[in-house]
Image: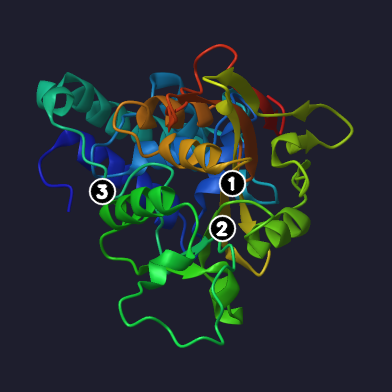
Amino acid sequence: MAGDDPARVLAQRLRDLRRSWWPHVSVTQGELAAALSERKPASIQLISSWERVGNPTPPPEDRLNAIITFFCTRRSIQRRPYRLIAEDELTAEEAAIRADLAADLFALRAEAVGDSSAEIRRQSIVGRGPWHYEAGPIVIICADPGNEDRSVPADPDRSKLSRLADLDSLFELHGFLRAVNPDLDVRYVSARDVVEDHWTAHLVLLGGIDWNAATSDAMRLTGVPVSQHSDDNDPSRGYFEVSGGDRFVPEFAERGGSRVLVQDVGHFFRAPNPMNRERTITVCNGMYGSGVYGAVRTLTHDVFREKNADYLAPRFIGDTFSLLFRVQVLNGVAATPDWTAPGTVLHTWPED
């Protein structure tokens, strides 16, 4: 429970308001975000940041005013999509309800923003951020090059992980997902071992079309206007392409007589799971492993995850979005992208 911390009390109050203010009506974060966006762009991630009881972020005054207006009248939910009624259109009864809500919530907000302990408290990743899910399971589908000859008896010392590609990305993401969602089932599976039941979970797909058929299926089924292309004869000629638009290619440099990768292209994409709309699909991809790792690290890195999450929140309404971005490779190591840095993000969809 929120306890005596006013910031947590406010967060819990906002969540309760959304879930149970009206009898037999539970407004989703997406529905509330869409309604608030009539006045100022909002997103599921933004709503979640105000409602999380672990290290909550009190909403700005204008956002809180909009929330209060939404819940002061049942006319907000009389038809879909839900809407935000103008304050000057409220009846006397609705205005009175609004005044009571405002007195309650703004008092809580005043306590929350005035509580210095909330500012110095070390931020916890548990139950918050873009990698937080309200329900599981969460299944990471890993690229599998298929180098293993399954007709040959397995070496007793062999690890199942040895079959998989992008192991650095898997280790980083699996641990982070477990930390953020300690009560949920988080597992991983090879792209070659995917079964029907996996497609009903929250899916996280690591790697691209060559070794992960699930990524190809996700791109086909969700309608994201980005495609990945590879060249078996010359892997360096692969690229991402925006439908009817630009191509984005990795960059190489000649160093010591060798051609080395100095910049990859990463792709982060999320959409509702087409096989189970109550769950999501997230793709972390790149032309090379550096791009995959960069895509993962954007929202797990302890320095950049908050900045990058804040970049997402005001730009994308709902739970469908895509970003292509540069991933710098420094001495063979992928550097975590900062989406807020000029020139890092190459393409976003929906376009902001």
Location of residue 167 in the rendering, given as x and y in whole percent from the top left corner: 42, 54
What residue appears at the point 26 percent right and 43 percent down from the top-left corner?
125
Comparing 207 with 161, the one in front is: 161
Q: Secondary structure at mark 1?
A: loop
Label 3 with label 2: CB-CB less than 8 Å? no
Which amino acid, by three-letter code, is at mark 3?
Val
- Mark 3 vs mark 2, CA separation in Å: 19 Å
Q: Marks 2 and 1: which is nearer the front? A: 2
Work out whether 236 lies above or below 116. Answer: below
Which amino acid, by three-letter code, is at mark 2?
Thr
Residue under label 3, please give it. 126
| Sequence-wise first label, 2 or 1 | 2
Which label is found at residue 282? none
Q: Secondary structure at mark 2?
A: strand
Q: Residue furthest right?
A: 244
Residue under label 1, please give it. 319
Comparing 56 with 335, the one in front is: 335
Q: Quadrant of residue 38?
A: top right
Location of residue 105 in the rendering, given as x and y in whole percent from the top left corner: 31, 33
In-image side of 163 versus 13 (left or right): right
Which amino acid, by three-letter code, is at mark 1?
Asp
Residue under label 2, please give it. 280
Q: Quadrant of residue 308?
A: top left
Question: Badge 3, how many Cα within 10 Å: few under 14, some, many 20+?
Answer: some
Q: Quadrant of residue 144?
A: bottom right
Question: Badge 1, how many Cα within 10 Å: few under 14, some, many 20+?
Answer: some
| Sequence-wise first label, 1 or 3 | 3
In-image side of 124 versus 300 (left or right): left
Label 2 with label 1: CB-CB less than 8 Å? yes
Location of residue 310 in the rendering, given as x and y in whole percent from the top left corner: 44, 27
What residue appears at the point 64 percent right and 51 percent down from the top-left corner?
208
